[in-house]
Amino acid sequence: MSKSKLSFMLLVILGFVIFTYPLGSKDGYQIRYMAEFSLEDLTFKRLMGYDILILEDGDWLAEPGKPMLPVKELRIAIPGGMEVKRVYVTDTQIQEIEGEYNIFPAQPPIRIGSPDTNFVELDENIYTSTQPYPTETVELVYQSDLAGQSIAHVLIYPVQYVPAERKVVFYSSLTLTIEGVDGYQCGDYLSPNVSEKNIRTYEKMVRDMVVNPEDVRLKENSERGGTSALPVGLIDHVIITTDSYATYYQTLVNWHTRKGIKDTVVTTSWIYANYSGSTNQEKIRNFIIDANTTWGTLYFLIGGENNNVPFEYINYYDENTPSDQYYSDFDDDWMHEVFVGRATADNSTQINTFVSKVLKYEKDPPPSRLSSGCFTIGHGS
């Protein structure tokens, strides 16, 4: 039997039913989800004498030294107020794949530009075991939310490996049950001032990421308020940069306005003077949260490198990595409430080049779409 190509397809059938009923003394929730898999796109490759199993649109278990097996993340929209407590499998259908396999041991990630690290040898305790790896077929990772919609993040392991026997087991069907209780509070909601266009954007974002888009229900928190620091208005796009760079972005602001995208420039000096925070990064983040609430702003462009508009660090694979995710993820749940980009331009020439490329890339809209109302905060005032 050839190991170079095994034609097995993993196709997730989205059969999804929600039941709510009392669990114990408090109202509770139970969600059932059935994932079925049919044969076609599951392939093996060889590397360094090991077998690598590749799942189309999947990922891998990545604990160094342990079998690198396929994993699939499912994001499931869950009812408002449900706090997920556990997930488990209630029914499976199993198929053993013929042949013997020596599954490649996962390796730690290597930073681009870093020298190669030493190869992590296989974990003998795992590779000599007669127990299936991983021991579970489903795992609750965490719960997040976006625009008032709660989401359960679940990892499903459609393949298990029995190392001592070198056997690979394929799950053609798994029925999951997710249980929870009432009381979950969302970390963020739709802005009370969000435009209809941006509501549709949020709806598409959430529906595209979950396996049950028909159950998505966005929610607005009418109690969230803005701050008097911002003038009244609806702004789609905000450019954050320094006082010295602000005027160079005005051409881009004008272009966006012509397209019907209300835009403005807000300077770091104005943000630092008007928002609280223990660091400048926290002040910028608080401004972005406020702009999203007060103006319904969905898009932000940071103009400048770290020495002009500072980035923040996030922990990724146990390393502090510079990132602007701190600004787009308001409640640190790895879900982005707004879109944040950065133009790493450090002088007027670089900014002009960046703006020129943007203008060249896009077509000019008809003159009838020209509108007014753009303004700059903290520059020339």
Image (tube, grey):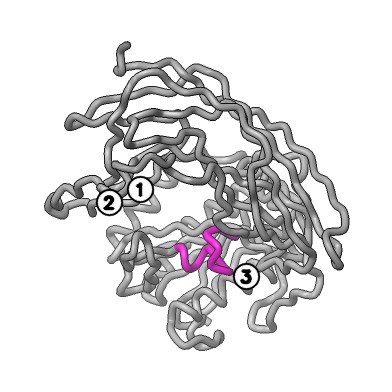
On whether residue 145 falls in the magenta region, the answer is no
Q: Which of marks 3 and 2 is nearer the N terminus?
A: 2
Disc number for residue 360: none
The three-letter amino acid code for the residue at tag 2 is Pro
Nearer the observer, disc 2 or disc 1?
A: 1
| Quarter residue 213 falls in | top right
Q: Outermost residue toward the top? A: 1
Disc number for residue 291: 3
The three-letter amino acid code for the residue at tag 1 is Ala
Identify the residue at image location x=51%, y=72%.
Answer: 266
Q: In which quarter of the image is the N terminus?
A: top left
Classify 325 as above or below 258: below
Is 115 or 304 nearer to us in this picture? 115
Which residues lie in the magenta part?
325-338
Circles 2 and 1, Cβ within 8 Å, touching? The answer is: yes
| Quarter residue 59 falls in | top left
Point out residue 342 in the picture as x, y percentages from the top left corner. 40, 59
